[in-house]
Amino acid sequence: MHAIPNSIHEGMKVYDRAMNAIGTVETFRIGDKDPSIPGVEAAGVSPVLEENQTGLTSILADIFSPDDGLPREVQEKALREGFIRLDADGLFARDRYIFPEHIDRVTAEGVVLNVEKSDLMHV
């Protein structure tokens, strides 16, 4: 996929390519309305992320925790292209980031990925 689908919502189940349930959508951002326009526009944002978005640094600080350890380039890619933060199943499971290229389809059951859980960037 080239973008995070508009039908994504918090709490939606997420499945890997073998249809194993790997967690739920914790939060998401669909991406910029028009990537050719400089700056970041909120196109479709999880209610958790809808707070004051005045500048890129402020947006990055509001969305990404320093504990995530995501490089700035990855954070900016996530804002441009959109992302889903996966609340991974399991007692000691680490949350992961899903980008548009990881999504195969969205069904009534949830988000189906074209990769395994281990292929996703973890936090």
Image (cartoon, rainbow, N blue to C red):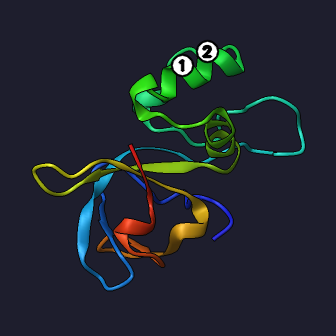
Say which residue appears at 81% left-offset and 29% top-offset.
Answer: 39
Mark 1 residue type: Ala
**Residue 68 pos. (x, y %):** 42, 34
- Mark 2 nearby-residue class (10 Å; few <14, some 14–19, many ≥20): few
Say which residue appears at 25% left-offset and 66% top-offset.
Answer: 22
Residue identifier under label 2: 58
* 34 or 86: nearer the viewer: 86
State which quarter of the image contains the C terminus. top left
Residue identifier under label 1: 61
Labels 2 & 1 near each other (Cβ < 8 A): yes
Mark 2 residue type: Ser
Q: Is residue 6 left or right of residue 79?
A: left
Question: Quick one: SS at disc 1?
Answer: helix
**Residue 100 pos. (x, y %):** 59, 62
State whether residue 20 is above or below residue 39: below
Question: Quick one: SS at disc 2?
Answer: helix
**Residue 61 pos. (x, y %):** 54, 19
Would you identify the image quadrant in which residue 79 lies? top right
Q: Is residue 7 left or right of residue 1?
A: left
Q: Is residue 118 left or right of residue 70?
A: left
Spot the residue most to the bottom. Answer: 18
Say which residue appears at 50% left-offset and 18% top-offset.
Answer: 51
Q: Is residue 50 visible?
A: no
State whether residue 114 is above or below residue 123: below
* 32 or 123: nearer the viewer: 123
Q: Is residue 88 left or right of residue 82?
A: left
Question: Which mark is on residue 42?
Answer: none
Q: Is residue 1 visible?
A: yes
Would you identify the image quadrant in which residue 107 lies? bottom left
